[in-house]
Amino acid sequence: MEIAAALEITLQDFPGKIAAEIFTRGCNFRCPHCHAKPMLEGSLPPVRKEDVLSYCSSSGWVNGISICGGEPSLQPDLEAFIKEARSIGLAIKLDTNGSHPEILEKLLAEGLIDYLAMDIKGPLELWNCSCGIKCPAEKMKASILLAQFFPQHEFRTTAAPIARPDGMISFMTADEIGKTAHFIAEHTGCRDHQYFIQKFIPRANGLLDARMEKFPKTPDNLLSAMLEAASKWLPAAQLRG
């Protein structure tokens, strides 16, 4: 496992757990608003998996581990790491962009994930813009279908500025968030999913696309309008951040 960074404890990222959090190195997307630039560039010193697991087993209070990225499904030994973590009594949360449904399918079949969180990059027509690449849309759609069969799952969208095809950059709109929620409900045939609309928070000299750093946090009135639009399709939608 190439671990670029780790947090000793998080009380928010893994619902119901006192969790450690690791951030794997590398990602196949280049989302312009992404905060993980140092992890993708490899500028941070690596963290040893042995040190992470030793800390978790000896802490006395950590009962879960949240695996984030980058994109964890790119790690060839992800399954082995998860099995090792489970062997010391840790529950597992996995964050993913959904680009490798075959990995999710295997983890699901083996019962290795307790909580799956998947990013949904806005409505379909914005996926390429939001991902910063020509995204593997069919694979992401397959992962959305798989996600609902994990013991717990959530979908989430960061209400970020979008570099649009015409060259303009503007915040995702409430209507676009509504279309995202509509797509999730229609694609899965279910309206009961947890869906989080996450606030965009700029970071100086830290985003993949420096142009995004000129934008403020997602305005509260826009977030409220987004929640109203999403709740029409996914009644359990919530704001986060």
Image: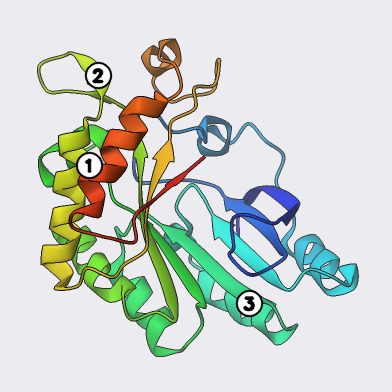
Q: Which of marks 3 and 1 is nearer the N terminus?
A: 3
User: Camera-side residue: 150 or 174?
Assistant: 174
Q: Earlier in the sequence, mark 2 or mark 1?
A: 2
Q: Residues within 10 Å of mark 1 (few under 14, many from 20)?
A: many
Determine which residue is flagged by label 1.
177
Relative height, residue 5 to residue 60 (above, below): above
Identify the residue at horizontal 44%, vertical 52% (top origin): 71
Q: What element carries label 1?
A: helix
Please give left or right for residue 110 compared with residue 233 in the image. Answer: right
Please give left or right for residue 221 compared with residue 65 in the image. Answer: left
User: Camera-side residue: 50 or 200?
Assistant: 200
Q: Can residue 128 be seen in this view?
A: no
Q: What element carries label 3?
A: strand
Q: In which quarter of the image is residue 64?
A: bottom right
Q: Where is residue 15 in the image (x, y as percent from the top left)?
A: 58, 65
Relative height, residue 97 to residue 126 (above, below): below
User: Camera-side residue: 124 or 172?
Assistant: 172
Task: Give the amino acid type for the residue marked by disc 2 in the picture.
Answer: Ser
Determine which residue is flagged by label 2.
170
Q: Position of residue 17 (x, y in %)?
A: 67, 69
Q: Are marks 3 and 1 in contact (CB under 8 Å)?
A: no
Determine which residue is flagged by label 3.
91
